Amino acid sequence: MSDRAQSLPGVTALILALITTGLLAGLFYAYSVSVMIALGKFDDKTFVEVMNKINVVIVNPVFMLSFLGSVGFSIIAGLFFLRSDMRSVLIWIGIGAALNIISLVVSGGFNIPLNNAMAVANDATGPIDYAGLREAFESSWVTWNIVRGLFNTAAIGALGWALVQYGRLTA
């Protein structure tokens, strides 16, 4: 069996890693250049309520496929290339996987806790300090969203370069 046929599942996983990573980077980019800018034009109550709604509806199978798939498919691709003689491909997959993992850690360590802290407005039984919730959320969340987006964007480059290396080795 040729190297190309032998590594077809790995290449498939690599392509899926690249696609899911691209979708995730695009989502973070869209938030940075449009969603958060638009929400910034609204009053505190509207800002908090809309972000809380977004944070509920975004947890859906399509989003989760890209959110977790970027890491999962990168790792799966790496596992397929682990036993091959295509170390240059494996190295770039490893870099892409590490960058995707860092983005996931940023999300879990910063963005999601900020989302959860602001969600208290949904459960409040008394007066809600919308201005305070927004102040504690907006600037930090936007900063960390850009950071995680940059890591995913770098991962696109690494995973794409892994595909280039694969093409060179199997040409």
Image (spheres, grey):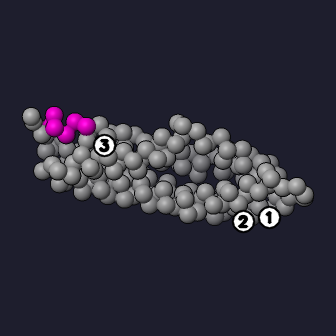
Tell me the residue that label 3 is attached to.
14
Q: Report how far apart the C-alphas of labels 1 and 2 lie in the structure.
A: 6 Å
Q: In the picture, residue 73 is in which quadrant?
A: top left
Give the answer, above or below, for where 95 lies relative to 34. below
Q: Is residue 170 visible?
A: yes
Q: For numbered disc 2, what is the local secondary structure?
A: helix
Question: Which label sits on residue 153?
Answer: none
Say if residue 89 shows up in the picture: no
Magenta stretch bounds: 4-9
- Crowd tier of the residue under label 2, counting other residues whose Cα lies within 10 Å: few below 14, some 14–19, many 20 or above: some
Within the magenta stretch, is there residue 8?
Answer: yes
User: Residue 116's x, y, as percent?
Assistant: 68, 57
**Do labels 1 and 2 touch, CB within 8 Å?**
yes
Question: How far apart, in angstroms, are the residues tagged by discs 3 and 2?
Answer: 38 Å
**Residue flagged by tag 2: what amino acid is it?**
Ala
Between 34 and 8, the residue placed more toward the observer is 8
Q: Position of residue 155 (x, y in %)?
A: 38, 53
Residue bearing mark 1: 132
Residue at the extreme right of the image, as rendered: 126
Give the vertical position of 26 relative to 125 (above or below): above
- Residue drawn 59% across and 48% down? 31
Where is residue 168 shown, x and y percent of the image? 15, 44
Q: Main secondary structure of the magenta part?
A: helix
Please tell me which residue lies in front, 120 or 163.
120
Which residue in the protein does label 2 denote? Answer: 136
Kind of residue at badge 3: Leu
| CA gap, disc 3 and disc 1 | 43 Å
| Residue located at (29% from left, 37% from top) | 12
Secondary structure category for the residue under label 1? helix
Q: Earlier in the sequence, mark 3 or mark 1?
A: 3
Looking at the rendering, in which quadrant would you find the N terminus? top left
